[in-house]
Image (tube, rainbow, N blue to C red):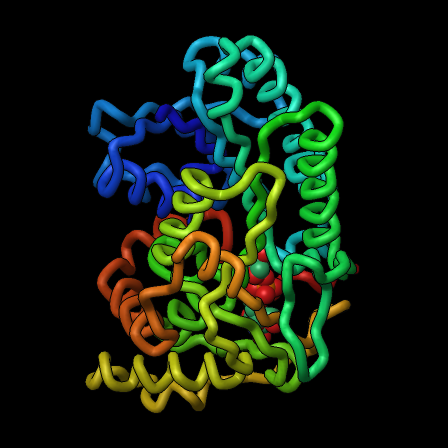
Amino acid sequence: MKILVTGGAGFIGSAVIRHLISETQHSVVNVDCLTYAGNLSTLDQVSSNPRYVFEKVNICDSVAVQNVFEQHRPDAVMHLAAESHVDRSIDGPSAFIQTNVVGTYIMLEASRRHWQSLPFQQQGAFRFHHISTDEVYGSLGDEGLFTEQTPYDPSSPYSASKAASDHLVRAWNRTYGLPTVLTNCSNNYGPFQYPEKLIPLTITSALAGKPLPVYGKGENIRDWLYVDDHARALVVVLERGRIGETYNIGGNSERKNIDVVRTICALMDEANQDSNHRPHEKLITFVKDRPGHDHRYAIDASKIRQDLGWSPAETFESGLKKTVHWYLANKEWCDQAVAGRYSGERLGLKG
Ligand code: TDX
């Protein structure tokens, strides 16, 4: 199958492409406009493969998107391109509305035109897979889990834009019959994540001996999913998910933020015995809370496990250890990713 992947130079998209090229026979057309968070070096290990092509295209450019469909005639779309950082959405929501809402609309319309032009048998096999987040469900209290039936209740401009895009995808399925599948995942972590998100920011700041900002009291809970487990789940859903269905994907790894940061500090102490910054825990700094900060996310992933046989391979402990070691071994990648763009400053307080 030829799969058009949007956002393939990003953190999750690049993990999906590495998985598709290394572990399957599918071919890939990577459509990415290379924003600050996009980085083609994430694809070095697969980019010379003849089953891989890159198209530098912004999904908001409908003419360029149309050309990509006409030129490559994909059998499926995996739509991952998105602005993803909650704090940036608080400071500047506009890019989130453009890319996540308008960009998804443009991808849906181009997919619909393309799908309608396919011969009848190929129409049935076509898929539009929209990759989304558990943040669309809002915040949990201390009990309960997000299921596929949880009502939408987004809190941030980011999660509201993803919720809007999910609604568009369902509407294109119900109204036009476009064969869609939708997934909502919990917090991803792993190699190549842009060092603005909690885990890579904590690791890179600890390495540099900089303060480790913990919002509020660090009591907020996230449910962590190793990115390669997520990539594998996405391909399972694309290949075997039922049209019109939604699947939640989570790693069964709920942790308080403060515990995540402390565990990273302990791993850094162990890995970097000669560091002057040991014990890294002394760098932890409690800072003003994020506006609209969701208390807890936790995914019930029983549907994807029961219907499609997927479950995560990594525990949080094994995945976090791999991640810390990856960042320690790839300091240069991090330095280049942020150079001239981001220096670890606090984001999300302009609201
Ligand atoms: O410096 C920090 N200190 C801190 O305490 C940062 C950057 C975050 N936090 C807290 C806020 C959250 O409770 O850590 C938690 C995780 O924060 P982020 O890494 O910003 O992720 P989150 O806001 O939970 O959203 C992420 O998961 C769902 C992704 O960014 C989204 O794209 C995804 O949809």
Location of residue 175 with respect to 89 vertically, above or below: above
Residue 179: percent from left, percent from top: 58, 30
State the image coordinates of residue 262 (x, y, percent, origin top left).
Answer: 44, 86
Residue in the picture at 39% in, 57% down: 309
Instruction: Pick the residue in front: 243 or 16.
Output: 243
The location of residue 52, given as percent across then percent down, is 29, 27
* Quadrant of the rendering where the C terminus is positioned: bottom right
Where is 139 relative to 237, above or below? below
Q: In the image, 156: left or right of 223?
A: right
Say which residue appears at 32% left-offset and 88% top-offset. 278
Residue at figure coordinates x 59%, y 34% from the top left? 180
Res 346 visible: yes
Please state which of residues 235 and 91 is positioned toward the viewer in this rendering. Answer: 235
Q: Quadrant of the N terminus?
A: top left
Image quadrant where residue 24 sits: top left
Residue 133: give x, y in percent of width and height.
Answer: 60, 54
* Direction from residue 43 to residue 340 in the image, left or right: right
User: Residue 269 falls in which quadrant of the image?
Assistant: bottom left
Please say whether residue 345 is visible from this viewpoint: no
Q: State how many labels appear.
A: 0
Q: Is residue 104 above or below residue 71?
A: below
- The answer to which quarter of the image holds residue 134 is bottom right
Q: On the rendered structure, is 136 left or right of 312?
A: right
Residue at image point 76% right, 57% down: 152
Q: Splitting the image into four quadrants, where does ligand 1 fall?
A: bottom right
